[in-house]
Amino acid sequence: MTLPDYVQHGPLLLAVPLAALAGLVSFLSPCVLPLVPGFLAYVTGLSGGNLEQQRRGRMFLGALLFVLGFSVVFVLISFTAGAVGDVLKQYQHGLQRLLGVVVLAGGLLLLFSPLWAQRELKVRWRPRAGLLGAPVLGFLFGLGWTPCIGPIFAAISAMAFTTGSGSRATGLGLVYCLGLGIPFVLVAVAYGRGMRVLGALRRHRVALDRFGAVLLIVIGLLLVTGQFQSLVSWMQAHLVSNFQPVI
């Protein structure tokens, strides 16, 4: 099976772009965005004042190792959700609607009580600052910030469950991690400009919060009403079937 065939298979056709968007929304959330400079300082072992003057290679490597660390956590959760979906395939439709209710509730909570919804689990132990500690800090970030970005990642887990396959769910988790991790890397390799962009984004945090909440509500409604699969079928019939590769 080729990569396009893999992505176009079943719910992945819709879930993959939603997972990438959800990863980006997680990065822009108030419990992650303000901490980006601190994370970059920690994983490179440098103070904030020295970050902009450092070689891009060290910044890139530190950010990449950090992203790999938290990707392990989120991919494992996605794989587990897909594997459970495979085992419980006969109950999938009912459980899908139940998960949709959870996602919908998370979206409403994020919309009306964002501070309560975006909490993190305090992990007191920290690895040594620097490149060697970067993947460990990323792993701890994945564990500690899962409650913080829980409403968003619950939607990814629900979509992973609908795939009914551990391998497809793993791919979905990887896409989510790319959406969350690529902005970290981009800020690291263009630190000065990245800080200015982050400052501009912080000024629109309320609008970004509401966009994330609306995204969750839409996904939740699609799952609860059973329209998720219907929308996938429509996309396969009207968008994919008529697609002709350039090469």
Image (cartoon, rainbow, N blue to C red):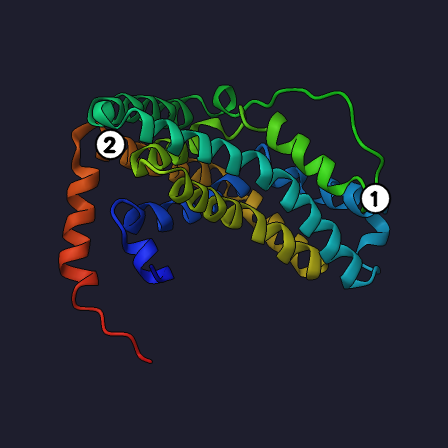
Question: Residue 186 or 233: which is nearer the viewer?
Answer: 233
Residue lying farthest to the bottom in this orientation:
247
**Residue 153: % across, % down:** 45, 33
| Badge 1 vs badge 2, beta-carbon distance below 8 Å | no
Disc 1: which residue: 130
**Residue 245: % across, % down:** 28, 74
State the SS at label 1: loop
Query: Can I make out residue 116 in this image?
Result: yes
Asked if 220 appears above or below 181 in the picture, the reply is above
Quarter that holds the N terminus: bottom left
Give amino acid for label 2.
Answer: Leu
Image point 73% across, 36% down: which residue?
136
Instruction: Answer with left or right where residue 105 lies relative to residue 63.
Output: left
State the SS at label 2: helix
Instruction: Answer with left or right where residue 155 lies relative to residue 50.
Output: left
Disc 2: which residue: 223
Image point 52% across, 50% down: which residue?
178
Give amino acid for label 1.
Answer: Gly
